[in-house]
Image (cartoon, rainbow, N blue to C red):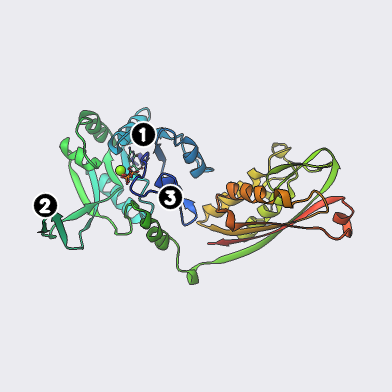
Amino acid sequence: MPKTAILIVAAGKGERAGTSLPKQYEPLAGQPMLRRTVAAFDGWPVHVVIGPGQEDLAAAALAGLALPPPVLGGATRQESVRRGLEALASDPPNFVLIHDAARPLVSSRVIGDVIAALEGGADGVLPMVAAADTLRRRGADGGWSLVPRDGLYRAQTPQGFAYGSILKAHRDHAAQEVTDDVALAELAGMKVVMIDGEEKNFKVTRKEDFALAAAMIEPSSENRDVRTATGYDVHKFTTGDHIWLCGLKVPHSHGLEGHSDADVGLHAITDALLGCIGEGDIGMHFPPTDERWRGAPSWKFLDHAASLVHGRGGVISHVDVTLICERPKIGPHRDAMKAKIAEILKLEPDRVSVKATTTEGLGFTGRREGIAAQAIATVRL
Ligand code: CTP
Ligand code: MG
């Protein structure tokens, strides 16, 4: 079977979208757009090209995915593609599919058809959709003229190529500016086959495109499986001068005993998320007998649970945790805890709630023997 690599170009600035992050890192229906685009190529070896300075954004967007380190792109899309192709040269594939990070809704039908056409002998493959609207061109004089729509098509990605030929085309024609890779393939005399693209494989370009893409991703609410589950955890006080609570180091007259950092708050939320997808509990994923987790920071457990939810196409709607203790006082730390949990789960802070209560001196929490936490999470699948 011929070896096929996927090259996703994500090195742009997303200026037309005007979002606070470059558009490929903006959340789209709860996940960074780039993560969704990579997920669309599930099962294929994906290589991502990112912009200089985007390393941290890319690491956060792609956390937990088994990908090679990203390649650094250039000032134009053409240059980014060329650099990506060059990076594959040490272990060259037979075919390469070049795809925009800004097209997260590419279907397995389109991907399969591109690859099938390459296997059928094409040097290049271009998915296209017919122009449906009446088209007009604005002339230099400001007047509008009708452009006959017949036979006009819009080019999409992934564009597929014989790897050696497209790399050579990029090297030979680097000085000529074009807007897609098929244009270069044609300059190099490669044989390009046109196939059917899909309207939904549109390029997220302007801000309003995010709402459109999100509506296409999220099934209508009545078809959506909304799941809720709880989590509960207790840790005992021991000697010490601080505890870890909801991802924060909080100074205290005691420490909390535990195999990991004993963060009851994050443990309860982790269990609630695992509960939403029927994935057992924290002890099953991170056994206390496993030396790897001795002293481990609990954000790793929560991050793992979130990636299991995302791996199923799930979106975390909301998490809420109640900390049950007489001391320390939670109020002064509440906002920072919310912000920390939101950061770990990549959620907006208003989707996270941190509450606290005492038990009026009653029971083990009342006797200040330990801290309990209970959490609830809601996930849409
Ligand atoms: N791209 C790239 N390197 C560049 C420019 C663009 O890898 N120097 C990528 C973008 O990240 C995007 C794809 O090429 O996934 C298509 O480009 P476009 O939609 O134009 O994205 P941007 O250039 O980021 O957006 P804009 O033109 O609005 O600034
Ligand atoms: Mg651009």
Q: Where does residue 186 sit, x and y in percent of width and height? A: 17, 40
Instruction: Give the quadrant of ligand 2.
Output: top left
> Would residue 41 appear left or right of 364 to someone viewing this image?
left
Residue hosting label 3: 33
Q: Nearer the viewer, mark 3 or mark 2?
A: 2
Badge 3 amino acid: Met
> 359 or 104, which is in the foreground?
359
Please tell me which residue is depicted at 36% across the width and 45% down the height of the picture. 14
Q: Quadrant of residue 150?
A: bottom left
Mark 1 Cβ inside 8 Å of ligand 1: yes
Residue 139: mark: 2
- Gap in angstroms between the C-alphas marked 3 and 2: 36 Å
Mark 2 Cβ inside 8 Å of ligand 1: no
Secondary structure of residue under mark 3: helix
Q: Earlier in the sequence, mark 3 or mark 2?
A: 3
Q: Nearer the viewer, mark 1 or mark 2?
A: 2
Secondary structure of residue under mark 2: loop
- Gap in angstroms between the C-alphas marked 3 and 1: 18 Å
